[in-house]
């Protein structure tokens, strides 16, 4: 199973996206059901082979999300994570049952450190738990993935024994995670090769890489694993994930596509959907993509230095190893301004990779008209920020209605705020230590709550004093953090909307109660 060649003669690498599971475990990246469904639909559309939709036993919210995604997705396999216990596996299967193609993914730690301190189990007990859990999962579902958590810090001989047992018990995919981002490319290639060559029944399963980015090596390690024989890589959009994140899907896919001369592998990913997926995940989570991020950063295809620009004008290949179009970044053909109509607006959004529902389009068009009245030039970045904002603020309990602020050197600064809370419009006037503090106090007056404000960050979407402000607010409550994001030509309106966005996410998070020791 490790050398499936495609029509092109190149081996196919399965893309397993875990944005909705490992990505969501990133502090502050929680998503609600509707947001997860949108992301799953984009992942399916872009040709992701396996969508890990969540950890069904973690909470009712997770269960519902996996279950809904399982009902709707038809062209990708839908996967749910579970620990080794029967209850976990049963819950995962219950959520996955409606899927056209379902996978149970079960895991347990195999490194001496994890077995001794985290599991407090003897290696032989872990071995037996692997046999029991995989057999149980396989009795329910034909497609079973088993992961040896902390695989790269596990003893090789022990790994060989337990992987052989997992395959015998019915595992069809064997994932060897670099859970703490510890390995380096050469070592990971060698480990994959060693396991595949030394486990007698290794040809009965597909081997998989799952890399975290603690040393900034997640993508390099994933590619190294493929060279060593892995034919599945687990990754997330924008590299979202706990700590330093997971391997970035877009980087792995574009590396394989750009360098077939050194890596003869292909994926089923429609790369022109990459920007759309990246923007959606960023908008939903509030995690801004750093400008110099490979493939999807705002500067990834920007050429400013004179020498580079000159070279680019003579031949794009001088400084571009892939085209912006290949990742869905279209060179602009339509310039937008205050006289642009709805039709042109819709077409422009399509060019930028957005396909909005009618109500979202109406909303976004209204906001675009307001912006065009206030701003001389509306850039693509403005439209992206505006649409991201419209999508992110859709269908929440607390909605922004209007804001009037008194700011300046004379006190008191104050904010008059109207919010719609659970369908009813409420208004208040509050003061504070400056305009932003007044706004946040007004929100607290209308919707009383106690949280810690951990981050308040403003950046300009484009250049110029009329640029839109993009504000990020991070709130914390009982160890749970969420990021809210909003953009507006008025920094104070953006601040208010970003706080409300974060608060709405916290309300969703409150409904989720994760059992103890749910780390993965
Ligand atoms: O990082 C990890 O080990 C995981 C496993 C559960 C696959 O996320
Ligand atoms: Zn992980």
Image (cartoon, helix red, strand yellow):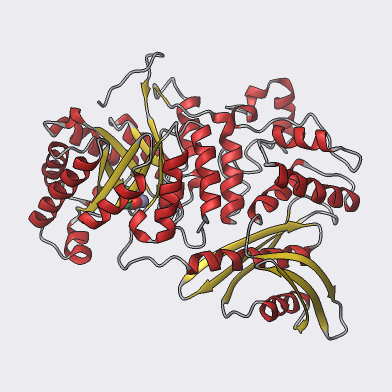
Look at the picture and state if 134 lies above or below 400: above
Q: Quadrant of the C terminus?
A: bottom left
Pick the front one: 343 or 201:
343
With respect to residue 413, does 175 lie above or below? above
Q: Is residue 171 visible?
A: yes
Locate residue 138, reporting x and y percent: 20, 40
Quarter of the figure with residue 199: top left
Q: Is residue 150 visible?
A: no
The picture quadrant where one finds residue 171 is top left
Residue 473 image position (x, y, % from top left): 63, 66
Place residue 466 in its image quadrant: bottom right
Query: Image quadrant for the N terminus?
Result: top left
Q: How many marks?
A: 0
- The reply, left or right, for residue 408 in relation to residue 81 is right
Give left or right: position of 235 versus 109. right
Of residue 44 and residue 209, the one placed in the foreground of this image is 44
Where is residue 15 shown, x and y percent of the image? 41, 34
Pinpoint residue 260: horizontal percent, then vertical percent. 44, 21
Q: Is residue 325 placed above or below 30 in the rendered structure?
A: above
Tell me which residue sits at (39%, 13%) in the image.
7
Which residue of the protein is positioned furthest toward the bottom in this rendering?
A: 411
Residue at x 37%, y 14% (from the top left corner): 9
Residue at x 78%, y 55% (from the top left corner):
468
For the residue pair 425 and 390, the one nearer the viewer reads as: 425
Look at 36% across and 54% down and name the residue there.
56
């Amino acid at each position: 199973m490790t050398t499936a060649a495609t029509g092109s003669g190149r081996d196919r690498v399965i893309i397993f996206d875990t944005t909705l599971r490992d990505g969501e475990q990133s502090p502050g990246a929680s998503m609600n059901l509707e947001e997860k469904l949108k992301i799953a639909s984009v992942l399916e559309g872009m040709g992701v082979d396996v969508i890990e939709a969540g950890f069904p036993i973690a909470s009712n919210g997770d269960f519902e999300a996996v279950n809904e995604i399982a009902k709707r997705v038809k062209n990708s396999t839908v996967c749910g994570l579970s620990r080794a216990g029967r209850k976990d596996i049963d819950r995962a299967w219950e959520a996955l049952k409606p899927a056209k193609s379902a996978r149970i993914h079960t895991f347990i730690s195999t490194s001496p450190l994890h077995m001794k301190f985290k599991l407090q189990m003897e290696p032989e007990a872990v071995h037996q738990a692997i046999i029991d859990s995989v057999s149980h999962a396989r009795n329910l579902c034909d497609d079973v993935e088993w992961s040896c958590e902390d695989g790269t810090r596990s003893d090789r001989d022990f790994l060989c024994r337990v992987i052989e047992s997992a395959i015998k018990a019915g595992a069809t995919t064997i994932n060897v995670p670099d859970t703490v981002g510890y390995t380096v490319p050469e070592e990971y290639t060698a480990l994959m090769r060693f396991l595949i060559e030394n486990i007698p029944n290794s040809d009965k399963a597909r081997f998989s890489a799952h890399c975290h980015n603690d040393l900034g090596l997640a993508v390099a390690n994933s590619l190294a694993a493929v060279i060593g024989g892995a034919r599945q890589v687990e990754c997330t959009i924008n590299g979202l994930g706990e700590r330093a994140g997971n391997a970035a899907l877009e980087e792995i896919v574009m590396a394989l596509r750009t360098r077939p001369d050194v890596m003869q592998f292909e994926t089923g990913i429609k790369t022109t959907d990459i920007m759309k997926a990246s923007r959606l995940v960023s908008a939903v989570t509030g995690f801004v993509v750093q400008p110099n991020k490979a493939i999807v950063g705002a500067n990834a295809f920007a050429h400013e230095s004179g020498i580079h620009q000159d070279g680019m004008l003579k031949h794009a290949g001088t400084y571009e190893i892939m085209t912006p179009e290949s990742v869905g970044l279209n060179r602009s053909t339509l310039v937008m301004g205050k006289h642009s109509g709805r039709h042109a607006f819709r077409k422009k959004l399509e060019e930028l990779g957005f396909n909005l529902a009618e109500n979202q389009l109406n909303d976004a068009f209204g906001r675009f008209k307001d912006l065009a009245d206030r701003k001389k030039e509306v850039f693509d970045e403005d439209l992206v920020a505006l649409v991201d904002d419209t999508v992110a603020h859709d269908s929440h309990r607390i909605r922004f209605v209007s804001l009037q602020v008194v700011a300046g050197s004379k006190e008191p600064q104050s904010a008059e705020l109207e919010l719609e809370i659970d369908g009813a419009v409420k208004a208040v006037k509050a003061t504070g230590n400056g305009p932003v503090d007044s706004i946040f106090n007004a929100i607290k007056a209308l919707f009383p709550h106690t949280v810690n404000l951990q981050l308040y960050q403003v950046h300009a979407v484009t250049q110029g004093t009329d640029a839109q402000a993009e504000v990020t607010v991070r709130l914390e409550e009982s160890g749970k953090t969420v990021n809210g994001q909003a953009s507006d030509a008025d920094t104070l309106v953006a601040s208010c909307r970003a706080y409300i966005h974060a608060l709405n996410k916290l309300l969703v998070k409150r409904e989720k109660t994760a059992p103890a020791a749910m780390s993965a």
